[in-house]
Amino acid sequence: MTARRAVDAALALLFALPLASLWTEPSASLTLKLFAAAVLVLTALRPGLGLCLAAALLPISPALHATMPAAAIEREAQALVLALLSAGFARFAFTPEGSRSRLALPALALGLVVAARGAIFSAADLADLSLVQSAGAVLSHVTREYFVPHERLPDLHRALAWIVSLALAVLVERFIRNDRSTTEPVLRLAIVGAAAAAAFTIFRAGQLVVASGDGLAGLVRMIREYRFNPFLADLNATGSMQLLYLIPAAWIAVTRRALWAWSATTLITVALWFTGSRAAVLAAFGGALAASVLARRMPRRWWVAVAVVAIGAAALTVWGTRPRRATVSEAMTIRWHMAVVGLQAAATDPLLGIGVDRLRTASAPLIPPELARMWRPAANGENAHNNFVQVLAESGVLGLAAFLWLLAASVGAPSRWRTDASSDVIRPGIVGGLAAFLLTSLAGHPLLIEAVRLCFFFWLGCMAAGTSLEVPPRGGRWPARVMAALALLLAVVVVPRIATARRDANAVGATAGAAPLAGRVDGVPYQPAGRDSAWVIAPETTTVEWTLRADFGSPRPCRVEIEVDRRLGAVLDLDDIVWRPVRLVLAPPARPRPSRRLDVRVQTDGCLLLAGPMRLR
């Protein structure tokens, strides 16, 4: 077996392990399991068919939780992708077919950085266990608890989720390079899937209009005022995702005059409008312009019409603000402040960053007072509203450099851009969709949403494949040298940090996943706590008295579970009106230990927990 096949086999095993936990997870519906099994079997037998099915299901995966109340929201997409990855890499490992990938090295570089940061935090989470016990806990989480709605090792899961996304881009590129006849069916089914999700959005909007009883007036009010999507709460990220499908669909509709593409374009455009994302509306024109320039397809007489439409869209976006929404000036000010906060957070650990999905909690003490007054939710921390700053803050300089390398590798050599576009009428649309998505990433953070991130990396793999591109050359020795230097640097930096993290995690008074004191609510000093947080207390503690509440505007009730030494100690339903006193009586520990820990897990999506003072006896 060659080295490449050995790597493919290892990757197939890596992704098969968490996929196995899907079959034992009772909260995952039978429908989701059948979809995952279909992707797995088809990919193993006919990779092109498996990729087509996954491409069609990926944009509608956020809709699965609407029909599967017990399913873990935002895990459906990952289940489908894990099935594709495990079967796809297994096929590459045990069959003669195979091809190189221009995305492999930058994806590996970014994956190593993310994994290194996840390993450091996971070491702290498992500090009360021996190394052998820690390895067993990791294996148990991956094979049994990966699809549990609120995992016990959140940083490990977040790192694996990013690695899954990166592997998807590599696999899609390799599949298309290996069989170029699958390109059009895959892209067509992907667009059809997005159109189906958009149609469901329009249907739900129609139901709301009918339920209001206002007829035409209700329809006009919804179009003018409402921001709506039945699947994803982050409407700006939803708009970014829809651009990935809208620009290719519109490009095919214009260049091929295909009725199905015009239908898909219309549906996705209406769904995009309902998101109310001003950045996405403007970025759509930027993406269309990028596709046109790349392909040299637009007649000169069209430029005047495009300019008029773009100016009109800009005016509509700037002045057509929906009620109860920040003005454009306020939105830009908020984004500027949050970008500065993101850079300040990045400065605390410039090499590896503060960890994936940790910026919101870490930014709480950095929020300037003027921003908190302008936008009250920011007082307890927020994300950067700029995905490049977000990657820098959470993955450091190494992570951002690897991410930019990945984007550059997917585009290829500039000297080939126009040649590729002239021989492939689909490629400009793909480039335009990704360009529009990245434009919105300057004013938002769509890659934080798992389903959106997977769709982005799917299209990145399609662009890297390039239906007319030849297999990329090995590229000399410099990529291997870069990877060797990165691996050595990470080994030198990460190993001591893991040892320090395990030692500090057992220090009485240490916390993880909670920001420092951020202020007072009703006279009570509080710390914003993340979705999963840990508090280390003295081993002789017998009673814990605490006060907790949900932040203003959090969903009610906000369910919180408190574990003592990894055993469930209390379940609370909090609201955002009053502080809730909590009293825990601790049983003696089962074995002598240097410290004890309280794990606090927020079970309600969208709830931000505020933790008051803790008294120990």
Image (cartoon, helix red, strand yellow):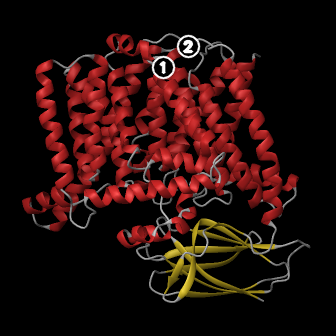
Residue at 54%, 44% (x, y): give it. 78
Report if residue 23 is visible in the image: no
Question: Relative to the observer, which residue lies in front, 342 or 170?
Answer: 342
Q: The residue tagged with tag 2: helix, strand or loop?
A: loop
**Figure quadrant of the N terminus:** top right
Q: Residue 422 location in percent, x, y?
A: 32, 11
Which mark is in front, 2 or 1? 1
Q: Residue 229 location in percent, x, y?
A: 32, 54
The three-letter amino acid code for the residue at tag 1 is Gly
Residue at 85%, 81% (x, y): give it. 588
How many discs mark residues in the rendered view? 2
Q: Earlier in the sequence, mark 2 or mark 1?
A: 1
Q: Residue 468 location in percent, x, y?
A: 42, 11
Q: Are marks 2 and 1 in contact (CB under 8 Å)?
A: yes
- Residue 43 is left or right of residue 52, and the answer is right
- Residue 344 is left or right of residue 237, and the answer is right
The three-letter amino acid code for the residue at tag 2 is Pro
Question: Relative to the observer, which residue lies in front, 458 or 141?
Answer: 458
The residue wearing badge 2 is: 472
Residue at 56%, 40% (x, y): give it. 400
Name above or below for residue 607 compared with residue 542: above
Name above or below for residue 4 compared with residue 359: above
Q: The residue tagged with tag 1: helix, strand or loop?
A: loop
How packed is label 2: few (under 14 Cα within 10 Å), some, or many (20 or more)? Answer: few
Quarter of the image for residue 396 reads: top right
- Residue 76 is left or right of residue 272, and the answer is right
Q: Residue 3 location in percent, x, y?
A: 75, 19
The residue wearing badge 1 is: 412
* Furthest residue in direction left, as rendered: 216
